[in-house]
Amino acid sequence: MSDKGNARSNARISDGEILEILGQKGTVRVFSEKYKAFTTGKSDISDHEERLFLCTCFDS
């Protein structure tokens, strides 16, 4: 969630770090989908996006 929303739900690892870690294990593809984030009415989150990191691992 980066800097959006409540501080306790902010991302703790960057996309670059995820790509670097997974890239050591295989080929990485990233899929994303924009959607309205669920809130209890306490946050005003706009332009929210969910990302899926798919890693096809190298043969051992």
Image (spheres, helix red, strand yellow):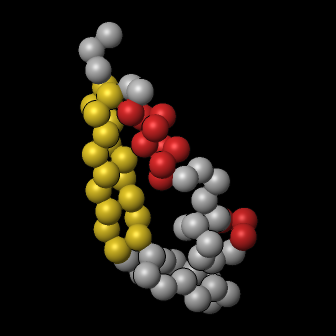
Q: Position of residue 19 (x, y in %)?
A: 42, 42
The percent coordinates of residue 31 (x first, y second) are 29, 56
State the residue at coordinates (65%, 65%).
Answer: 9
Q: Give the x, y percent position of residue 55.
A: 32, 36
Q: How many marks?
A: 0
Q: Is residue 12 above or below residue 1?
A: above
Q: Nearer the viewer, residue 25 or 42?
A: 25
Q: Quadrant of residue 41?
A: bottom right
Q: Which quadrant of the view contains residue 34?
A: bottom left
Image quarter where the C terminus lies is: top left
In the rendered image, the quadrant that contains the N terminus is: bottom right
In the rendering, at what x and y percent does residue 38 appear?
Answer: 51, 78
Q: Is 12 rendered above or below residue 59?
A: below
Which residue appears at 48% of the width and 85% of the height? 46
Residue pictured at 63% horizontal, 85% vertical: 43
- Res 26 quadrant in image: top left
Identify the residue at horizontal 39%, vertical 25% (top origin): 25
Q: Is residue 48 above or below residue 59?
A: below
Q: In this view, which residue lies farthest toward the top?
A: 60
User: Viewer-proximal residue, 19 or 38?
Assistant: 19
